[in-house]
Amino acid sequence: MTEFDYDLFTIGAGSGGVRASRVAAAAGAKVAIAEEYRVGGTCVIRGCVPKKLFVYASHFAEEFEDAAAYGWSVERPTFSWKTLIANKDKEIDRLNQIYIRNLESSGVEIFQSRAVLKDSHTVYLQALNKTVTAKTILIATGAAPWKDEATPGMEYAISSNEAFHLEQIPERILVVGGGYIAVEFAGIFNGLGVETTLSYRKGEILRGFDDDLRAGLHLEMEKKGVTILTHSLIEKIEKKEKSGTEYFTVTFADGNVLETDLVMVATGRRPYSQGLGLEEIGVALDEIGAVVVDDYSRTNVPHIYAVGDVTNRANLTPVAIREGAAFAETVFKNNPTAVNHAGIPTAVFSQPELGTVGLTEADARLAGHDVEIFKTTFTPMKHTLTGASEKALMKLVVDKKTNIVLGVHLMGPSSGEMIQVLGIAVLMGATKAQFDATIAVHPTAAEELVTMR
């Protein structure tokens, strides 16, 4: 008989924790998992999945407009926020149940409770007032929205979590931030008819992305009606009321004042590591609270591992899933597996959409590559009839010496779909000559990738 209640106890039933638990259970381990909110994690419950449903919803306004150019006559459409929320909730409930069934069918015991570490083998389940032990413990609690609470009035601002559950859609909104969550929600609200302003404290949105994509998206978002304020630092938020209607005034450091009905702050996420007992038992955390791990997701405390956003390595759902599987392979299948965090393809469901993989032009030059840039900007074929001024952009960053494609950066329809496949080519070290040797699929936007000279 084992000296522990479980071989593995996972804290956090998001993408990484669920995958690790299921793989470990399939390998014969006795596994339990604790989740304090809903099984499925941020991505499924209040992140990528509901957000993309909102993105789809926000596209229809332009689709209705474009239809006329193709001979369709559409009565003046109306939009129901309550219907969107109800249908979104129904889908999230369905996915939540699927995650629960998959865990249970794998033999994983689920505890609906906050879990706190007491030592390297002991977990206290608060909701049940129960203590359990495990040979190995995995931290997979993800990350949570972060706001600078030192800013006066910040308590009036919502995060992306609350944006999914608003009782009604505002007439005006200020979205604060310049990362992918901020630009995606700015596009969502703008597409749904909200007067939308995006403020960012630095000089250009989407820090870390290729500069041509950053400038290109900025221009296209403004063309669609989003007001973008750069170099704008919020000094205070004040709640006001007029004729029984609540609104807010936002004062910026430069003295400008903006009146809005809602403030949504998307200035980043921080690892959800506080209050779990990690520091008390000696698990090393970095300056923002990320759990410090090695290439195999091991912490400095024996028997304790961590995967996903709580480690702040590459905060993407597919990465957490890969890390969870690699952890289980390493610990329960005697197959040491490390995850390669370089060259990860990713998409931003902004409007227009972005896709990117590999090195940006700036990073390639910084790394010492003598680069050759291939870039094209064009009007998507759909808009040759609609007359819309939206542009698509495609860019290849190529090493002159080796001819290897170091990076691919896209803006335009289906960029997310294209970048998934392009990620394979970049990971394999494809050359520009191999791109050129590939026969184009016509008429598509993607053919530009193999015809750029």
Image (cartoon, rainbow, N blue to C red):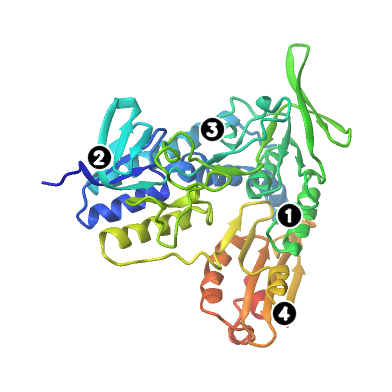
Q: Earlier in the sequence, mark 4 or mark 3?
A: 3
Amino acid, disc 4: Val
Q: CA distance from mark 2 to mark 3?
A: 40 Å
Q: In this rendering, is residue 404 above or below 334?
A: below
| Secondary element type, mark 4 | strand
Instruction: Report whether 311 appears left or right of 403.
Output: left
Identify which residue is drawn at 62% across, 52% down.
Answer: 349
Q: Amino acid at mark 3?
A: Ile
User: Residue 98: x and y, percent?
Assistant: 34, 43
Name the residue that disc number 2 marks: 133
Residue at which label 3 appears: 85
Q: Secondary structure at mark 2?
A: strand
User: Which of marks 3 and 1 precedes in the sequence?
Assistant: 1
Along the viewing direction, whichever of 221 and 141 lies nearer the viewer: 141
- Spot occupied by residue 8 in the image (x, y as percentages of width and height): 27, 48
* Spatial separation of the CA atoms under disc 4 and disc 2: 55 Å
Residue at position x 67%, y 35% in the image: 148
Residue underneath mark 1: 69
**How much space separates mark 4 and mark 3, taking CA atoms?**
47 Å
In space, the residues marked 2 and 1 are separated at their CA atoms by 65 Å
The amino acid type found where label 1 is placed reads: Ala
Q: Residues within 10 Å of mark 1 (few under 14, many from 20)?
A: some
Q: Is residue 54 visible?
A: yes
Give the alpha-carbon distance from disc 1 to disc 3, as whole Å: 31 Å
Using the rendered view, name the quadrant where residue 267 is placed: top right
Q: Residues within 10 Å of mark 3 (few under 14, many from 20)?
A: some
Looking at the image, is 26 positioned above or below residue 400?
A: above
Relative depth, front residue between 432 and 321: 321
Disc 4 marks which residue? 371
